[in-house]
Image (cartoon, rainbow, N blue to C red):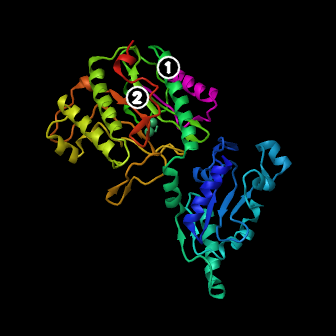
Amino acid sequence: MQAEYRQRREQLMTKIGNGTAIFRSAPTAVMHNDVEYTYRQDSDFFYLTGFNEPEAVAVLAPHHPEHRFILFVQPKEREKEVWTGYRCGVEGAKERYGADEAYPIAELDEKLPQYLEKADRIYYRLGRDRAFNDKILKHWQRLLATYPKRGTGPIAIEDVGILLHAMRLTKSPAELELMRKAAEISVEAHNRAMAITQPGRYEYEIQAEIEHVFRRRGGMGPAYPSIVASGTNACVLHYIENNCQMQDNQLLLIDAGCAYEYYNGDITRTFPVGGKFTPEQKILYEIVLEAQQQAIAQVKPGNPYNAFHDTAVRILTEGLVELGILKGEIDKLIEEEKYKLFYMHRTGHWLGLDVHDVGVYQHGDNPQILQPGQVLTVEPGLYIVPDTKPAEDQPEIDPRWSGIGIRIEDDVLVTETGNEVLTAGVPKAISELER
Ligand code: GLY
Ligand code: MN
Ligand code: MN
């Protein structure tokens, strides 16, 4: 992978010309008191370096005569490493991560200016760490003050995310290999979950089985908090308590995905706990499944990004009208977003190093056009939240539908000729879900 990280840096350096790009590692996050969460590197930082330690800064200075890639890292310190683990150190940053030069992070303020003095721009993304943003601004301010003496130096700060995220949007063969692995493990976990679900079991038992598969197969763990939602819990989009006992005649909605070497899977399936859909569940499920399949068919190169969402919305709205849950003309209902009471999220998102991955969806009025190598989720759903008040001019909601929540989500790769569903290995046809 080191060759690929280098190639990504070269590609970005071509784009920034005489600028200097600065990247900050992700902060460590506190779980409670002095206990920290497992460290996870910032995705941009990782994409360019593969370096997964905290307290680091990466600099790309394509115009610098000697050092084009510089890493500031935590120095090796025996006593610290005994507690918090291995550090690659300054030498390791050069030897293992290909930095032309490396320094201890404590020398950032002293060493950074030499990489900015001749740059015409600073490429940086404002982050959550205000103090670090401030640090960069102060460096810029100092260079501006001395600009008249040198006649060189950055005259603007530009967001590096725009350039970098356009790169991240199209996955390389090496990235796709990792995404396939994340998908494959996620598929195995969902199949395991289906096999062991039965009335009387608790949602957390299913969660445990899923996450057991993630780790057993070498994944980092869940890509996001696993949702195991039986019955009306499925109507809470981010239900993660997962502590209820599952009953016969309920549906179980599982939204879970594995992170594998920083790449993510994101799958949702909804199926009957006791092996048989009730008539109402089956009717709603068929609508969502149809919406999902038709939406997936819209994922192909040359199609605008919004096509698959629009298709899903249309099919869901038509279905709701057919059942008498909505009333009126389809186009008008869509225009007035009347479906949103029952379908309140978008039909998908880019997927990659981040679960909700970076990349532009829309350029002003023009949607992104799908291209081979992009990966997105397709995840329509219907949620008949109990006690939902119908919109004005809309009918009362028949209680027979109340509390049913359904979502079906797959990870879809745009190919040269259409698409490939990376997560097709989890069944979703009614005949496969009933037993
Ligand atoms: N599980 C997060 C999502 O589906 O977007
Ligand atoms: Mn999901
Ligand atoms: Mn998703």
In this orientation, does residue 223 appear?
Answer: yes
Residue 45 x %, y %: 62, 53
In this orientation, does residue 26 appear?
Answer: no
Which of the labelled discs sits on residue 262, or is there none? none
> Is residue 38 depicted above or below 216 in this figure?
below
> Is residue 288 depicted above or below 142 in this figure?
above
Residue 360 x %, y %: 43, 54
Q: Residue furthest front?
A: 417
Give the total number of marks visible in the rendering. Answer: 2
Q: Label 2: how many residues lie within 10 Å, few (<14), some (14-19) or many (20+)? A: many
Q: Is residue 401 left or right of residue 91?
A: left
Q: Label 1: how many residues lie within 10 Å, few (<14), some (14-19) or many (20+)? A: some
Residue type of the residue flagged with mark 2: Asn
Residue under pointer 1: 202
Residue type of the residue flagged with mark 1: Tyr
Q: Is residue 209 magenta?
A: yes
State which quadrant residue 69 falls in. Answer: bottom right
State which quadrant residue 125 falls in. Answer: bottom right
Name the quarter showing ligand 2. top left
Query: SS class of the residue under badge 2?
Result: helix
**Residue at horizontal 49 percent and vertical 30 percent from the top:** 241
Q: Is residue 64 left or right of residue 172?
A: right
Question: Which span of residues is magenta-colored?
Answer: 202-230
Q: Is residue 116 left or right of residue 91?
A: left
- Real-space CA distance between mark 2 and mark 1, rounded to the nearest whole angstrom: 13 Å
Where does the C terminus fall, quadrant-wise? Answer: top left
State which quadrant residue 31 falls in. Answer: top right
Residue under pointer 2: 233
Q: Is residue 354 magenta?
A: no
Residue 202 x %, y %: 50, 19
